[in-house]
Image (cartoon, rainbow, N blue to C red):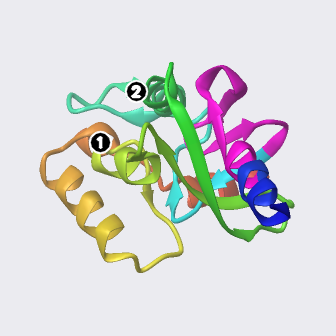
């Protein structure tokens, strides 16, 4: 009986409705007060700009954030913790109504593969790049390089 109660509590804590989920940027969210970073992807920073297909600047960080919000809006969100990062955030693979959010961000071009060799993630990024989706429509600086340059 005690085991069933523990399993039930775990299931409750592992899922949240979108109302309980706050998207903070294109690769991070807060769920039930817990800071979560989507593992294996890196989305542009909120203030980052990129070049569109015609060479004009656009707010790609804000577009990535809005795309992530649309992915979770009104859906049941669950995350599987993989590790903890240096900022004490859960590094997780997250799902909205069972669809992998990490993979969706890559497949739609609003994030790049980050510190993983996950073949599904690499394939999704390559397909987005080939189709010129999201960031891949024009020129952009990787979010990692952007963060480094903004520190100096």
Residue at the image position 50 percent from the left and 19 percent from the top: 74
Query: On the image, numbered disc 2 is attached to which residue?
Result: 57
Q: Is residue 101 above or below residue 88?
A: above
- Please name the residue shown 49% across and 32% down the image: 68
Q: Nearer the viewer, residue 141 or 104?
A: 104
Indicate the position of residue 1 as horizontal and vertical percent values.
80, 61
Residue at the image point whose x is 83% and y is 68% from the top: 86
Q: Residue 108 got which mark?
A: 1
The question of residue 19 being in magenta is answered with yes
Q: Position of residue 110 (x, y in %)?
A: 40, 42
**Identity of the residue furthest to the bottom in this view:** 117
Which quadrant holds residue 148?
A: bottom right
Q: Is residue 103 above or below residue 69?
A: below
Asked which quadrant contains residue 97, the reply is: top left
Give the magenta-colored segment's residue range.
10-34
Given residues 145 and 18, the one toward you in this image is 18
Q: Nearer the viewer, residue 68 or 96?
A: 96
Q: Which mark is residue 134?
A: none
Distance, label 1 to label 2, CA atoms, is 19 Å
User: In the displayed image of the protein, which residue is found farthest to the left?
Assistant: 131
Residue 136 visible? The answer is: yes
Please tell me which of labels 1 and 2 falls first in the chain. 2
Identity of the residue drawn at 74% across and 37% down: 30
Element under disc 2: strand
* Residue nearer the viewer, 99 or 38: 99
Q: Position of residue 11 (x, y in %)?
A: 67, 50
The C terminus appears in which quarter of the rendering?
A: bottom right
């Amino acid at each position: 009986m005690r085991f069933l109660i523990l399993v039930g509590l775990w299931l409750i804590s592992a899922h949240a409705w979108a109302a309980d989920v706050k998207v903070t940027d294109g690769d991070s969210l807060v769920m039930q007060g817990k800071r979560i970073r989507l593992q294996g992807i890196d989305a542009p920073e909120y203030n980052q700009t990129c070049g569109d297909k015609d060479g004009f600047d656009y707010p790609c960080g804000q577009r990535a954030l809005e795309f992530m919000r649309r992915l979770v809006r009104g859906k049941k969100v669950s995350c599987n913790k993989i590790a903890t990062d240096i900022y004490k955030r859960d590094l997780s693979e997250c799902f909205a109504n069972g669809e992998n959010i990490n993979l969706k961000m890559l497949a739609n071009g609003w994030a790049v593969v980050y510190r993983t060799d996950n073949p599904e993630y690499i394939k999704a990024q390559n397909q987005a790049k080939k189709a010129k989706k999201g960031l891949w429509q024009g020129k952009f600086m990787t979010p990692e390089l952007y963060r480094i340059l903004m520190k100096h």
